[in-house]
Image: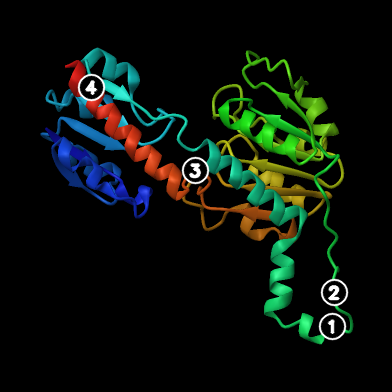
Amino acid sequence: MKIVLLDALTLGDSDLSVFDHLGELTVFQTTDEQQTAERVVGQEVVITNKVLITAQHMADNPQLKLICIAATGTNNVDLEAAEKAGITVKNVSGYSTESVSQATFSLLFQLIHQSRYYDQYIAKKGWCDSPVFTHIERPFYELKGKRWGIIGMGTIGQRVAELATAFGCDVCYYSTSGKNSQQSIEQVNLATLLSDCDVISIHAPLNAQTENLIAAEQIQQLKAGAVIMNLGRGGIIDEQAMATALDTQDIYHGTDVLAVEPMLLNHPYLSVKASQRLVVTPHTAWASVEARQCLLEKMVENIKSYVAAN
């Protein structure tokens, strides 16, 4: 079986030898739009994280039998065309729950503890010149007793709710689909969540219900001192409106995702003057060593299950 992995660089230093026993593997670190067509020629299995696989690619490659997506989202594959062509598409879910949940708290602690400021204070030898044993120039806060709102109560949202509860937070949530009902957690509308909560974390997919969900009007509803974090998808928050608000409102923002990735050179977040109110990470929340290992193992199982069924 001929297998091609189109964007191995997105998996970091993961051990790809797990695929060796499955067939003849060809690995490309990156693949751009112009290279995709030539690289899928003759391949029976295509593994892609973000590389777009179109109806034309499928039509030009009748030997293609299986597309493995190294992620949960399937928006980079034309699913309708795959079904018509008899091509199986398998994604991977549930591999990054712990990683993303942990990253949520990593972003939060940097903001509510002002960790970057204090680290820089030490690096600049400010503590060496202190007249007293401590330095508490920037206020920081405890989580206990804070109201935490979750947007998107899927598997990750539920795990974050558990952890927030363990820290003593009062948790509520807003269902972006309107279908989710967690009996043990208070469900509220979006306006209530935005205006009442001290901490807000987003764990929703990007779709018609969530695109631009948090725009200028919604940002204005945030309470003073609120922290809002996006661990879902870029495009859920209006980034220009958020950049403006960070310099004009008493709010904090952490995000691991942007509407366009990689980050653009002229992105508004790079011009925020109140930089202590903002933490951005380069879409790493999903990618703990353990999560990537789990992802690879589940992709191997997807390929094995396909072979067994055919």
Quadrant in which the C terminus is drawn: top left
Residue 77 in the image: state x and y as whole percent. 34, 28
- Is the residue 153 above or below the residue 137 in the image? above
Q: Are marks 2 and 3 in contact (CB under 8 Å)?
A: no
**Label 4: element kind:** helix
Please give the name of the residue rendered at 52% of the width and 58% of the height, measured from the top-left corner. 265
Disc 1 target residue: 130
Q: Which residue is mark 2?
A: 134
Q: Rounded to the nearest whole Å, what is the CA distance between mark 1 and mark 3?
A: 40 Å
Is 213 left or right of 65, judged from the image as shown? right
Q: Is residue 108 left or right of residue 156?
A: right
Q: Which of the 4 image quadrants contains residue 174?
A: top right
Task: Kindly identify the amino acid type of the residue bearing the numbered disc 2.
Answer: Thr
**Pointer 3 residue:** 286
Helix, strand or loop status at disc 2: loop
**x%, y% of residue 2?**
12, 35
The alpha-carbon separation of the residues under discs 2 and 3 comes to 36 Å
Q: Amino acid at mark 4?
A: Tyr
Along the line of sight, the residue nearer the viewer: 252 or 132: 132
Q: Amino acid at mark 1?
A: Ser
Return the disc, 2 or 4, that comes first in the chain's sequence: 2
